[in-house]
Amino acid sequence: MKKINRFFTSLKIKFNSLLKNQGFVRYSKNTIWLFIYNISQMLVSILVGIWVARYLTPARYGLLSYSISFVDLFSVFASLGLESIIFREIVKNEENVENILGTSFILKSIGAFCMFIPLSISLLFTKNDLFTNVLIFIIASATLFQGFNVITFYFKAKVLNKYVTIASIVSLIITNIIKIILILLKSDLIFFAIVIVLNSIITAFTLIYFFKVKEKINFFKIIRFDKPLAIKLLKDSLIIAFSSATVIVQAKIDQVMLKEMMNTNEVAYYSIALNLIAFFGFIPTLLKDSLYPAIQNAKKVSQNLYNERLLNFYRLNFLAFLITAIPIYFLSKFIIVFLYGKEYYPAGELLGLMSTRLFFTNMGVARSAYILTENLLKFSLITMICGTITNISLNYIWIPHYGAKGSILATIVSFFVTTFALDIFYKKTRGNCLLMFRGIVTFFRIKI
């Protein structure tokens, strides 16, 4: 009994000590704000998203999903891969923050305008009618306001996620209320595309307001262009931009190809299944964010400890896959009909098939911990490019015969190429690949 009392007394002292630590309190609050936003976004987006899908019906919902995916393929021109670079530069050079923000804003704004050139050229090779192209251009115009996202990276670098979260939640609430009003008014599809633009506008101006409140200065007054800094930022972001483009193409090309080779209904069914599967994508990311520091620190201690923690990490991610994928596989049709109605019944079979995708999502995120620790980013980019080429090639072969099912199978094969196939042939990653297989077959030996 005395030992138990001493344990709780010690625990209380440590907890009180942490509460007095300003750094701990600051970063804890920062994490809590992020958690609040992520949960809010997931719940609201799914609930309102279900209502929107039911109202629009598969044909119109599929057209909206296709238009969003088509624009996303060119979004790298607006982002330029600058996000993490801006964050890094603000942390490293606090005295040059205004130059960094102003130059980054101009670069991203120029990129957003330039995006319309390749987008317009690409539309010439599609089978789209005038209405679909108008829909795409409306959605694409939302990227014109993404330059203001540099304020987001400023707040994150200053550990002030509270402002980012509030801005995002304000936009989330307003735009979803508008979506509900549009449904009640039986509005046309084009208004739902306009809401996407409105979301970017509200977020941008809310961020501008909080920047003025925090820094006591109008954001527009610090906009200036530093050419040497711009060249440096673009040079540093080149590989990241290329990697981002590869990831986006692999993620979005399926829906674009389904519409071009089949119809919007297939896009709708595929999109519905993908959205539900994506909901569980936060699990491996959360595990990585929590356990990556322990894995990285183990590398400094010994190779054995490092391998043991990686092995345990792979076991944990495979176990998480089983816990989520098995119920989804067996309940997929019931889930779709219950949430979206009988009109979306074909999405049930796709959801069951797509549950296997969670295996590659979980193991891919787990693998990225090893890739980051060993600094194998260039090799990782090569695997992503090979996976993307595989995905596009198999889509061309399988979509005409199997529709959305063929697209899912193509994605699964491409993920296998990205996550496992090339790793087994590369000397530096072969040992880790075997460790992943070992973690999969011995998941029941997981050590907490």
Image (spheres, helix red, strand yellow):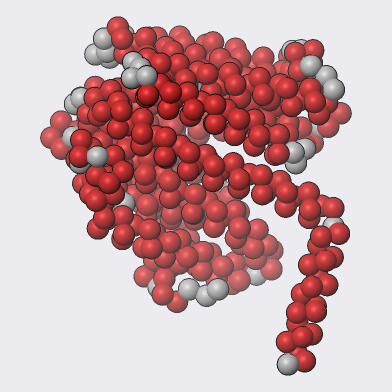
Closer to us: 416 or 212: 212
Residue under the image location 29 percent in, 39 percent down: 340
- The number of numbered badges drawn on the structure is 0
What residue do we see at 37% from left, 14% from top? 190
- Left or right position of 199 against 263: right
Q: Residue at x 33, y 15 (%)?
A: 188
Q: Residue furthest left?
A: 401
Q: In the picture, residue 6 is in which quadrant?
A: bottom right
Image quadrant holding the C terminus, namely bottom right
Is 401 above or below relative to 71?
A: below
Residue 370 percent across, percent down from the top left = 54, 55
Residue at 37% in and 24% down: 183
- Where residue 303 appears, x then y in whole percent? 61, 68
| Residue 393 visible here | no
What percent of the width, then of the height, locates residue 45? 45, 37
- Taking the image as shown, residue 416 lies to the left or right of residue 39, namely left
Residue 373 figure quarter: bottom right
In the depicted view, which residue is nearer to us: 111 or 183? 183
Query: Residue reaching furthest front?
Result: 184
Rendering quarter of residue 74: top left
**The residue positioned farthest toward the bottom in the image shown:** 1
Q: Is residue 276 left or right of residue 22?
A: left
